[in-house]
Amino acid sequence: MRYRVYSIITLVCLAVQTFAQQADCRFPVEGLVIDSVSREAVPGASIRMDAGNKTSFSDEHGHFSFNRGCSGKAVLTVTALGYQPYRKELVIGGPLELTLQLQPTRLNLQEVEVRARKPAAPGVNANTTVSGQQLEQTKGGTLADVLKSVPGVSTLQAGATITKPVIQGLHSNRLLILNNGIRQEGQQWGMEHAPEIDPFVAQSVTVVKGAEGIRFGPEAIGGVILVKPSALPKQGGLQGELNLTGSSNGAAGAVSGRIEGGLGNVPGFGWRLQGTGRASGNGSTADYYLDNTGVRELNFSGALGYSRKKVEADLYFSHFNTEIGIFRGSHVGDTADITALISHGRPFNEVDFSYQVDAPRQRVAHSLLKLESHFHLSSNSHIDLIYGLQQNKRQEYDIRRGGRSSIPSLDLTLITQTLDLFLESMNSRGWKHTVGLNGLVQVNNNTPGTSVIPLIPNYDTYNAGVYYIGKLSQNNYQLEAGARYDHKYLDALGYDKDQNLYGGTRTFHSLSFSLGGVIYFSPGWSLRSNLASAWRPPVVSELFSNGLHHGSASYEIGDETLESEKSYKWISTLEHQSDRLRFDLSLFLNRIDNYIYLKPSGTFYQSIRGVFPEFYYSQTKALLTGGDIGLSYNLTKALEYELKGALVRAKDLRTEGYLPWIPSDRLENSLAYRWAGRESFVKFSHLLVARQNRYESGSDYAAPPAGYQLLGLEAGTSFLFGKTRVLLNTSISNLGNTLYKDYMNRFRYYAHDQGRNITVRGILKF
């Protein structure tokens, strides 16, 4: 009897215990995975809980969660590429919130460079990221200078002071730039309107070469550039960075500083302050100065962030302010003078060096306010809400009589508001779903008092888009498909030189699609392929401009009947990564219906301010094909060979002729010797740019210039000075001081490109 009673009591106790255990498996366990040194989020970490054999992965913000943790003891095991395995024992008695700090493993710079070549942007499209040492070697330059190291990327210039990126033959409004997650909206419609972004802010810059119209909306026909600052610190402590650069050409100098930290008594709170000042005088070619080509720049930014439980919020503000001199030799008095100048190919009057910036010049101020909220719904889903407010004020000054050069001839203020909302979720079968909404409201006004008929009218524009992307990830392949619909409304109004009212309303809309995938071969090989459509409605300058564009020293005429561009781009990329070889080869085909381009008229426009080449906007069917290659091979442990090449073929399908302003074929070779753990290096490079032979004879004011070859030399090292990390590097571009012209320079009619330039950089990290 006793035995029976004891057995019954034991069984009841076990049942109660089992029931209690089941009832207690409701405790959420969540937290952040961060780098113990930089305090930045570690995305893609695998977190395994032995109790219940559950696995979670940290998202791009470093967040992870388990919805149901059972009471009692449990062990978390965390693994991530580039970090030592981490193990933590837990006692679960209620909801837990953890911060897991991973210790970085010792990775040499070669491995860091390999990791930088991996896709850093969402999606299956080919992309390349510039970061780490490669980014540090471009400090003091423009955003376009940073991107020139990426195969398939070149630059479009307006003299010595203004550069903008070109990806596989396309530039300006066909490239979408995301500045800290906000699409950059300035007066970027001009060839000489450079992006108003301070590269010192960036921790990484990623180039996505495929058409990304689904994910990012209109104007992503040629690709996307993602400028991303480092994540805000989430823990207490103070850290910072000081950059100092100096260049011989233009006697240029730049200083940029950053300081950031957290609050120890407020976990999850982070802040950052950053500022940059830059100045240069007249640039020089191999044997003469370029008059009035100085630059003055002053930028600053600040950020606040808070991360707690299921919510993260970030507030970011930046202000970019620059004054840019326009080469004075591009402004001449009459038709005979400009014809003689183009024939001569260089200024008749040589000048001395000067820091003074006079008319013609540009003054641009761009402010950006961003508010982002990130909501963790579960370990596999989240919602992001991003609001952006931008003000872009552009003033262009011309040489005017009667002492009126201090009054702008073009004075525009552009206000843009954007709102992005998207939901991402992933299931256990490897499917990731993204549903999003985008909205944009834009108002542009001419400021009165210029005494000049505005080049473009006042306008308002409204854009709304909705999209869906589905992505399946398996062990040896990924598949992705998406669709998007956009609608845009434009209302413009202005007066022409005869006081006639012009403008009106236009409505544009389009459906876009994307289909692509990645196959992973062994060992280290992968093949990416993507077919996508994208579109771009004509901007106001293309529709209605009719006047002197001072920044480019040209007279431009729009066409209000222009239709939206529609692109169908196919791009495939073969990639390989191993200990000694890193290789990628991209081939692309881009069919663009209603392709809009600026066509030389062959005549000159005469005004009281001088004589200028005349261009008008035209539309055709275009086909762009080509490819680019990037290769890096370790000949020995210390000696590395690198190859980069690109070619683009652009045909006008209506006339069977060639399109203007397409980059020439280019090939760059370099040889680098690295030692001391690859932190010290010497690198010698050779760039070959061919003559652009694919152009219509007589269609331009001057035939494309001859091809050229440039030599370059770089060297750098780093060391510890107490607790401060010091990085020093120097570079010499155009080592042989070659006198040359580049076809993609709008001022090649009047002058040569930059001569030898020695740049010295010092970076202190503390």
Image: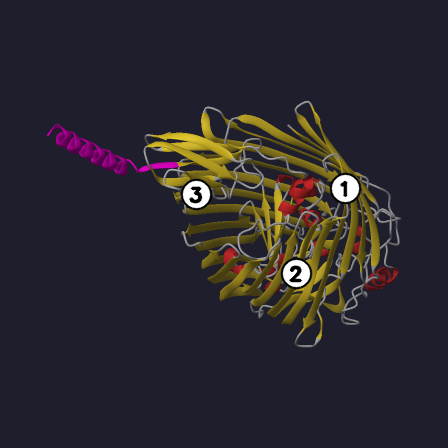
Numbered label attached to residue 638: 1
Measured in 3D between alpha carbons, the distance from the residue under mark 1 to the one under mark 2, in whole angstroms, is 28 Å
Q: How many numbered marks have been drawn onto this rendered protein structure?
A: 3
Q: Nearer the viewer, residue 689 or 716?
A: 716
**Residue 598 rendering spot, x and y as whole percentages:** 68, 65
Sequence-first tag of 2 and 3: 3
Numbered label attached to residue 56: 3
Q: Residue type at mark 1: give it.
A: Ala
Callouts 1 and 3 close, C-beta under 8 Å: no
Vertically, is 565 above or below 710? below
Q: Tell me which segment is drawn in magenta.
A: 1-29
Label 1, residues with CA under 10 Å away: few <14, some 14-19, many ≥20: some
**What secondary structure predominates along the stretch shown in magenta?**
helix
**Residue 679 rendering spot, x and y as whole percentages:** 72, 36
Measured in 3D between alpha carbons, the distance from the residue under mark 2 to the one under mark 3, in whole angstroms, is 34 Å
Residue that label 2 marks: 586
- Looking at the rendered structure, the secondary structure element under dot 3 is strand
